[in-house]
Image (spheres, grey):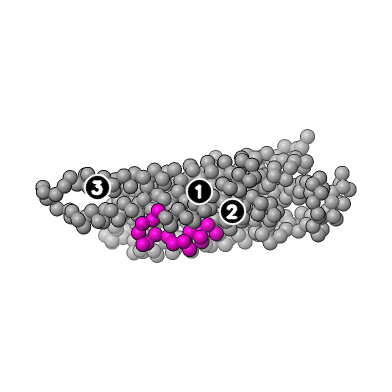
Amino acid sequence: MPASAPSHEPAPVPTPAPTPASRPRAHEDHLRALGLPMMIAPSARLRDLLPRCAGFAAGLAVFGMAVAALDRSNDLAVAFLEEFGIDDDPTRPDLFAASEPIIELLALAIALAVAAPVLGWLTGKVARRVPRAAAFAVGLGSLLALVVVPVVVFSSQDGPTLGDTLLAAALVLVGTYAGVGSLVRWSARRVRRELGTMGPMVARVLPILMLAVLFLFFSAEIWQVMVALSWPRTVAVIGVMVALTVLLVGITTRDDIRHELQQWSTDTPLRPAERVNVLLVPVLATLIQAALFAALVFAFFVFLGWIAVPEATEARWTFGAGDNPDGLLLGLPFSVTLVRVALTLAAFSALNLAAAAASDPAHHTRFVRPMIDEVVRGLDAREAYRAARLRSAARGGAAPRRGDEERRRQLRQRG
C-alpha cells in the first residue's frame, strides 16, 4: 500500500488517476483535470477538436443573438425618442404601447444572455457523450452557427461582418486545441480549493504584512498621492505591481520546475508546448493565491477606512480634495480615494506574498511546494499516458512512428 501523502499537500484532484492499463482517453481526461492539456498528443487533440469546441461555440452564438437583440432595442429606443420626444403631449398615442417592442427585445436579450452559458454547457455535454460522428456534427453545427447567426440577426450597420465571425470561430478552434477550456476549468476548481484553504495562509502572512502596511495606510502622504490620481493612472500603478508579481512568480517557479525536470528521467523529452504548460500550472496556482489574498486585503482596508477614517480626517489629509463616489461606486458609504488606497495596498500585498514565496523557506515549503508536487505527478501521468498509447497502438496494429519501437522495447523490458 502506498505511503500516505504529507500533510502539507493539497487535496487530490476530483478525477481519480487512471491505472496504467486504462485506455488513452482516461489518461487524457486525467491530464486535463491536472491542468496539463498540452501533454496530450497533438493527433488526439485534433481528433477531439470539433466536439470539444461545440459548447463554447454554441454559447457564443446564443450570446451574439442576445447582443443583437439589445442592439435592436437600442435602435428602436432612439427612433422612439426621435418620433415622440420626451415632453408630455396628451394628443400622442399610448407611450407604453409604442415602447412595448423595446421592452420585449430587452427581455429577450436578458433571457438569451442567461441561456447562453447553460446552452453551451449542455451542448458540450452532448458532444462528449454521443458517438464520434454525431459529436463531429454537433461541433461543426455549433461553429457554423457562430459564423452565420451573428451576421444574420444583426440589423444595424455596426454589427459583425462575416470576417469578424470567421475570426471568432478560428480563435475558438485555436483556443480549444491549446487547451484553454481545460485550463479555465482547472483554474475554477483551483479557486474553490484555495478558498477552502485560505485560513492558514492568511493567519501566517496577514499579521506580519499588517505591521508594515497599516502604518502606510494611516499615512497622510499616500492619501494625498491617491486623491490626485485619475483612474487611468491608478490602474497603471496597480498594473505595474501586478506585472512585477507575475514576473517574480514566473522566475521563481521556473527555477523550481527546472530543478525538478533535471531530476526527472524520461526517454521522451518534453516538447516546447509541454514545457510551457508545466510552468503555467504552478504559476497560475500561485497567482490565484495572490489574487484571493489581494481581494481579502482590499476588503479589509475598505472596511477599516470606513470605520477608522472619518470624512473630517480624510479632508485634512487630502486638503479637502476628496471626491464622493460616482459611477459604479454611487451610493456606497466610502470615498473614491479610500477605494484607490485600498486597491494600491492590495496590489502591494500580492507582490509581498509573491516575494515571501520566493525568499521565505517556510512559506515556500507550506504553500509553494505542494504545487510543484502536483507538477511532478503530472509528469508521471504523462509517462503513463504515453505507455497507454503505445499499448493501444500495439493492440490496434497501427504503424509506429519514429522512436516508438525503442519505447515499446523498453516497455516490454519493464514488464
Give the spatial CA distance, label 2 vs label 3. Answer: 42 Å
Tag 2: Cα neighbours inside 10 Å, few (<14), some, or many (≥20)?
many
Please state if 415 lies on the left or on the right of 356 as rendered.
right
**Earlier-in-chain disc, 1 versus 3:** 1
Task: Evaluate if marks 1 and 2 touch, with contact meaning CB atoms under 8 Å apart.
Answer: no
The magenta stretch is 153-170
Q: Quadrant of the C terminus?
A: top right
Q: Which residue is mark 2?
A: 176
Q: Amino acid at mark 1?
A: Ala
Q: What residue type is disc 2 on? A: Thr
Q: So how many labels did they put on this image?
A: 3
Residue that mark 1 sits on: 58
Q: Quadrant of the N terminus?
A: top right
Q: Which mark is residue 224?
A: none
Please check the rendered image and state whether residue 161 is part of the magenta-colored stretch, yes or no.
yes
Indicate the quadrant where residue 248 lies.
bottom right
In this rendering, position of residue 222 left or right of residue 103: right
In 3D space, how far apart are the residues under numbered discs 1 and 2 (Cα atoms)?
Answer: 14 Å
Q: Position of residue 366 (x, y in %)?
A: 63, 46
Labels 2 and 3: the sequence-earlier one:
3
- Judging depth in this view, the residue of 34 and 56 nearest the camera is 56
Q: Is residue 195 above or below residue 86?
A: above
Q: Which mark is residue 99?
A: 3
Question: What's the residue at 53%, 53% (across, down)?
Answer: 143
Q: Say which element carries label 3.
A: loop
